Each structure stands twice: as C-alpha cells, then as structure tokens.
Amino acid sequence: SRFGELLKKKDHFIICVEVDPPFGISHEKELKAVTELLKGKIDAVNIADGPRAMARMSPIALGKLIAEKSDVEVIIHYTCRDRNLLGIQMDLIGANALGLRNILAITGDPPKMGDYPDATAVFDIDSIGLIHLIQNLNRGLDFTGKFIGEATSFVVGAGCNPGAVNFDYEIERFKKKIQAGAEFIFTQPVYEPSLLEKFLDATKEFSHIPIIVGILPLASYRNAEFLHNEVPGMQIPPQIMERMAKAPSKEAQREEGIKIAKEMLSYLRKVERVKGVYIFPPFGRYESVLRVLE
C-alpha cells in the first residue's frame, strides 16, 4: 500500500487523523472532514472500530466510502471483540478485495464499557493472534495454515500504550506483536515526553519498527481530569493539568489544549524513532486538528 511505502520513506513525517464512524448511515460530516477540511494536510485517516464499545458504522464500509472520494490512505482499525474466527477471516478477505490494505489490529474495548454491556465479547483471539492471522492471509493461508488461493496484501500494525499502568506487561506484549508480524505501531495519546522516552528505551531492539504517536488536544480542564482519572493508561502530568486549570474560561482552556498539542507535535518531529503522529479530534471537532497542524 501507499501507506506502507510512506513508512519506509526516510525523511517523511507521517500525519494521520482518527475518524470515528457515525452512529447512523449519514456520513457526510466524516467525508467532508477528509475530502475538504483536511485535504492535502494529512497522509492517512484511521477509522475506528466501534470505539468505547459503541455500535457505529462498520469501519470497512466507511473506509471504502472515503477511499472512493479521496486520495488519502485509509487505515482500518479491526478488533477481536465482535467477531469469531470465521467472521474475522471473511471480513478481512472482503476488505482486501475492496482495496483496503492497511489494518491496525487491536483487541478492542470490552462491551461493558459501552451501550450494550450484556453483548457477547468474542475474543477467540487477541490482537497478537489477529496479527498472526493477517500475516497468514498475506501468505495465502487461513488461520489453520490451509491454502486459500491468492494471498492478501495487507500492511498490518498494532497499538501500544507508553503510559500503561503495567509497563513491563505492555513491553512484553509489544515484543510479541512485532514477533507476530506487526510492521508499524500506533500509540495511545502521550502528554509526557519522559514517558515516551522510557518506552522508546525499553523497545530499542525494535528501532526498525516505525512508531506513530497519538496526540489528543485537551478540550477543557474537566476533559483533562476525566482522561487522567477515568481512562486506564492515560497519564496527564501535573504541569499540564496546572496549565489547563489556570486558563480562565472554556475558550481559553481549549486554546491551551491546542497549544499543548502543538508543542507535543514539534517535540515529536525531533525524536529520531518517531515516524509520525496520529491526531484525535476532540469530540469530533476536526477544526482542532487543523489548528494543531497550523
């Protein structure tokens, strides 16, 4: 894929933006964000797969709709939560046939987080098993190693969290993801350079793997508090909290959030192992992404 080529390009800093699919069928807002607002400013869009365990449009469907209308690369997030081994292979073979070649393999948020707490969480495999499965498909084999004909041509990546509460476990899983065949890594949002440096240091034997770091502009002091206290593995350092708290109004807090994100972006551009950034629009506000990139 073109995204796969960008990952190998020496001096290109990749800019990706997360797009959450809509709850219903109307997808004009998402399409417009990519084809008009962010046109020419980003390399790829990441399409989330039922984030926070909420039922939204299929990422494969939205990915195809965006790919038809735009020349930006599409990265499909794919979770193990909702489909069994049969469904996973069917979806992926279909996605490849539709021309969607970039997959971010993730385990997925548990249903109890979302609107359907009693929904079955399948998890026949986790993200490591999913990466292994995709690399099998890339060799023309199914999960059991049976020949299925023409091979798929996926570029597959994995997620990781430099701020994970259990850091050693996160590093262990990071290594297993690379061993299973992950070709790139997307991180959760990072606000603390020292956390990222610790993570890069712990994974330096894999310095050939491109790392794309998450940036989520804080929308307000309350938003920062929520992320820090309620979202597992999200650490917002005291000095950032203080800056958000000092901003006198909602508007000033939003501005401060954008300023912090811009500082993070300029820091990340200088970090040797960081291949790019992955910007989350706070509450679906794509204008904030534009502001960060200014």
Image (cartoon, helix red, strand yellow):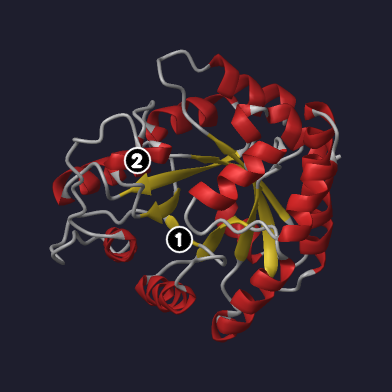
Q: Which residue is mark 2?
A: 113
x then y, percent, for residue 239: 78, 59
For the C terminus, the quadrant is top right
Q: Residue at x 77, y 48 (%)?
A: 261
Viewer-closest of 238 and 199: 238
Q: Residue at x 70, y 60 (%)?
A: 237
Viewer-closest of 93 and 113: 113
Q: Which residue is mark 1?
A: 158
> Is residue 138 visible in this depiction of the protein?
yes
Relative placement, left or right, of 34 versus 232 is right
Looking at the image, tell me whether mark 1 or mark 2 is earlier in sequence order.
Answer: 2
x then y, percent, for residue 243: 82, 49
Q: In terms of secondary structure, where does tag 1 sit?
A: strand
Residue 206, placed above or below residue 53: below
Q: Residue at x 38, y 36 (%)?
A: 50
Identify the residue at the far bottom of this view.
205
* Location of residue 45 by image quarter: top right
